[in-house]
Amino acid sequence: MTQLSNARAGVITPEMRTVAGKEQVDVALLMEQIANGRVVIPANGRHDRLIPCGIGEGLFVKVNANIGTSSDRAILEDELEKLRVSIGAGADAVMDLSTGGDIDACRRAILEEATVPIGTVPVYQAVIETVEETGALIHLTVDKIFKVIERQAEDGVDFITVHCGLTRSALEMLRKQGRVTDIVSRGGAFLTTWMLHHDRENPLYENYDRLLSIAKKYDITLSLGDGLRPGCIADATDRAQIHELMTLGHLTQLAWDEDVQVMIEGPGHVPLDQIEANVILQKKLCHHAPFYVLGPLVTDIAAGYDHVACAIGGALAGAAGADFLCYVTPSEHLCLPDVSDVREGVVVTRIAAHAADIARGHKLALARDRQMSLARKNLDWETQIKLAIDPEKAKRYREQNPPAENDVCTMCGKYCAIKQVQEYFRE
Amino acid sequence: MTQLSNARAGVITPEMRTVAGKEQVDVALLMEQIANGRVVIPANGRHDRLIPCGIGEGLFVKVNANIGTSSDRAILEDELEKLRVSIGAGADAVMDLSTGGDIDACRRAILEEATVPIGTVPVYQAVIETVEETGALIHLTVDKIFKVIERQAEDGVDFITVHCGLTRSALEMLRKQGRVTDIVSRGGAFLTTWMLHHDRENPLYENYDRLLSIAKKYDITLSLGDGLRPGCIADATDRAQIHELMTLGHLTQLAWDEDVQVMIEGPGHVPLDQIEANVILQKKLCHHAPFYVLGPLVTDIAAGYDHVACAIGGALAGAAGADFLCYVTPSEHLCLPDVSDVREGVVVTRIAAHAADIARGHKLALARDRQMSLARKNLDWETQIKLAIDPEKAKRYREQNPPAENDVCTMCGKYCAIKQVQEYFRE
């Protein structure tokens, strides 16, 4: 039984109760949202320490942090530290995108420790093992892909990115129209290479029923990936991207037919003025399945600050209806993030998610800002720091530059506007 | 003669030529935009080293950095370093908001060195001198205010913030409706205190003609301040704020009647979903005078990261038509920024301004992103770093974590999607 099949049968699961409690929403309404596919709870029964998390319409906007080794950097302890820091900074989910070292061991260690849902991109491991075993990606087999998916499912992975919508006709469209950066999705690039070499259809598309049967068995949530997401502003919202999105809409319905939970992945690099349209399109074409966006980055030139370009796009996407924001760190486009990059990425993306919640009129989000502002008016520094998105950093700033008068700050010193108004205006 | 009177007379000034050259726009069109008040060039004839900068419709979105001493921290050399760092990081203008130490000396040193337009808030100095001379703000006189404005004008200040729209009727409206954070503008708080104590109208409103005659004489651009800007999400877009904005619309016309250039200042703290409406309102109510926004911050809880909350709001405001973004640093709401906070604030706000330019379809902005993306596709790291918003930080990231294969990065290592696609897809 999956969360979806339970919801459709009118059964409230313990996972639904946990999520309803955390979100302060009615559990029967939540069940209904799950039944109609607008909310997912990625929760593999084998992920022991998981505290379930809901993603979708009517809930807080969620944040994902990507961690994982690469062929250049593969130290398990570093990745576990990134996991801890991500959760500590407020990440709602973490993806293990390891491509270096002992991938199984890394994933298993992460799953053993993680209290948040864990996602993966199984095609990475399938390709890497193929390269290690045969010397070339093109020897990847359909069986290999599904064996890796099954292995990861057995380990307790809660959601997987599968680029099922990257079809031959989408690639043909991409070829015809041309692009500045072609394909920037790693999974998309692997599959494209294989498809072109063998002149065959995407194995994840062709064998989608096999994928659904594994997903159903373990209640893995499918995160239908965007292998053709735009990798730069110039490529955004093009025919190839929208073609893939339409295919994902069809695959969403097929998954729902099998009681499999689905999210849809989205771009990428998108100019600010096209973000709302992208969200509306996804919601409509994919029947309101939750939308999981990577960014979007609103410019290509913010190397070193792509977390900020991502926060701008993510906040706007969230306000327009996106449900799940994948973070980007300051090291994006430059190198593998270290622990401090991960922390910065999570905090900044949480700000975007919260700004989106505010824009969506979420009562609990608005209440927190109101409390913060009352503390600000009352010059109550302890409460301000407690309510800050990152109390540690706020405290550090305040303490490193202490004011002469304790109730104000060094920005205005004794000419504090708030104090002034308190003394004269409110008498 | 002001830029506005020249433009109205059909005279193309050297300042207009410089701006048209930098912006790659037609100088006759620029002159027309200045004549109809949609563009300003804040350029006091006494500011010797100034390289003129245009602000308004059809031009790049501009960024301002606030610097200046406070009663708690007043070291001239620190502020000069902040000036240099601001300009180096790409600030288009700088405001000297000094309220501590020798305010005249600080401003003069800044003006002597600055190649960008310099702005001030003269009422700060008028109040501080009054407090020093008489012991209390309430002894502030109308003459004192105008003597300080004239002194700053003679020094070469290019634009001044004057909270002329904070009238008694606006305050009455604020009292009636109530607010979470009342007044958070420092200048607004000073004036309110004085007005309530003396039961008198705002001296900058009542003596607006005197202000206009000084502004006209030196061609100081008036930045009509928002003393009643919302200081928190809950107070945004309320009656008090909009009342003040409507008054500023009237004062804009009066300034234009005297050939005085005008910008309008805007909020503040505004939920993401209200930002576009704020820009549309300002443009309509103030007859398309340039809009200069402080933020807007899209949440109240981002202490330590308010530069990011500001970048989100600023990008959206810019995309909607705001022309000039005042930065916020990571230290906002906590302490006076140091040099590194200033740098971070400028870079992040420049990202917001650039994202807005992209959204507005600015051809030169789009071209830069395209070039960056081509360099990315070609794995041309040198060009990527050169085109990054902050080449220094991008270079540092790349060098601190060097890949085994020189053409990729440590994020994907040998499994680089771009390289993969180059090798297989583009053969």
Image (cartoon, coloured by chain):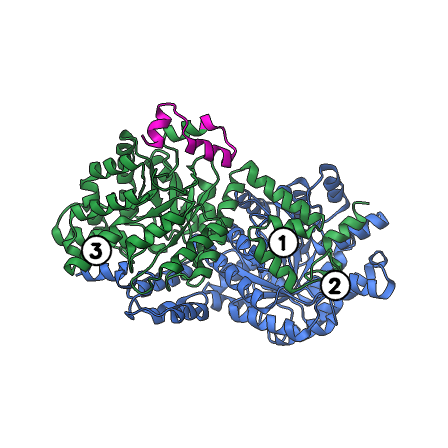
Chain colours: A blue, B green
Mark toward the viewer: 3 or 1: 3
- Which residue matches tag 3? B129
Q: Whole-percent x and y of residue B293?
A: 38, 46
- Which residue matches tag 2? B404
User: How many neighbours does mark 1 have within 10 angstroms: few (below 14), some (14-19), or many (20 or more)?
Assistant: many
Up the image or down, B64 lies above or below A365; here it is: above
Q: Is residue A291 left or right of residue B328?
A: right
**Mark 1: which secondary structure?**
strand
Circle 1: residue type: Glu
Q: Chain of mark 1?
A: A
Give the spatial CA distance, label 3 vs label 1: 59 Å
Q: Which residues are magenta?
A: B1-29
Residue drawn at 48 percent across, 40 percent down: B60
- Which residue matches tag 1? A265
Q: Chain of mark 2?
A: B
Comparing A321 with A309, the one in front is A309
Q: Whole-percent x and y of residue B175?
A: 21, 52
Q: Is residue A159 left or right of residue B248?
A: right
Dominant SS type (magenta): helix
Sooner in the amino-acid sequence: mark 2 or mark 3: 3
Query: Residue B21 magenta-drawn?
Result: yes
User: How many neighbours does mark 2 have within 10 angstroms: few (below 14), some (14-19), or many (20 or more)?
Assistant: some
User: How many neighbours does mark 3 have within 10 angstroms: few (below 14), some (14-19), or many (20 or more)?
Assistant: some
Q: In this rendering, do the residues under marks 2 and 3 share a single chain?
A: yes
Quadrant in the rendering for residue B287:
top left
Q: Could you tell me if residue A90 is visible in this image?
A: yes
